[in-house]
Image (cartoon, helix red, strand yellow):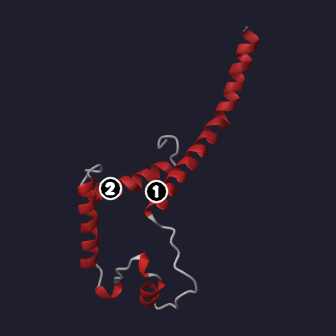
Amino acid sequence: MRVLDRDFTRKYHAMGMGTLRAWTGGHVNDLGKLREGYVAHYEAMRRIVPKERLLEWHASEGWGPLCEFLGKEVPEGEFPKVNQGDWVADLHGKMLVFRFLVVVGKVLGWVSPLVAVGVAWWWFLR
C-alpha cells in the first residue's frame, strides 16, 4: 500500500521505520535492541535538556505535576486516559484501514471507466 498511498502511508511508514532504525541500530525486529534504544534515548534527553526544563512525568500522576511544571491551573475533571497501548495499536490499525479504503476509492475512480470500456468492448465483440 505504501506504493499506492504516497500522501500518507508512505510517510507514516517511513517515520515509524526511521524511529525503529535509530533506536535499534538498524535491527528493527530485535525487541531487546529496541528496549535498549528506548532507554538510551531517554538517558540522552536527561543529559541534553537542562533539569529545570525537563519534566519526567507519567500520565498516571494526573494533572498536578504537569500543570505545576507548565505554570497552569489544574483543569476540572479527571485526567483523560485514551493514549494506552491497546487503544493506540487499535487507532493505528484503523488509520491504515481507512487509508486503504481511500486508496481503493482512488484506484476505482480511474479503474471503473476502464472496466466499463472493457465490458463494452467484450459485449460488442461477442
> At label 1, which amino acid type do we have?
Ala
Residue appearing at x 68%, y 20% in the figure: 118
- Residue 81 is situated, as x and y percent measured from the top left of the image, at 50, 72
Q: Count the numbered circles shown.
A: 2
Q: Nearer the viewer, mark 1 or mark 2?
A: 1
Residue appearing at x 29%, y 51% in the figure: 28
> Do the CB atoms of the residues marked 1 and 2 lie less than 8 Å apart?
no
The residue tagged 1 is 89
Q: Is residue 51 above or below residue 104?
A: below
Q: Provide the secondary structure element on which disc 2 rests.
A: helix
Query: Which is more toward the observer, 24 or 121?
Result: 24
Q: Is residue 87 above or below residue 42?
A: above
Residue appearing at x 44%, y 84% in the figure: 66
- Residue 86 is situated, as x and y percent measured from the top left of the image, at 46, 59
The residue tagged 2 is 20
Mark found first going from the N terminus, 1 or 2: 2
Residue appearing at x 42%, y 87% in the figure: 65
> At label 2, which amino acid type do we have?
Leu
Q: Is residue 43 above or below residue 88?
A: below
Q: Provide the secondary structure element on which disc 1 rests.
A: helix
- Residue 16 is situated, as x and y percent measured from the top left of the image, at 39, 55
The dot on residue 70 is none
- Residue 112 is situated, as x and y percent measured from the top left of the image, at 68, 31
Quadrant placement of the C terminus: top right
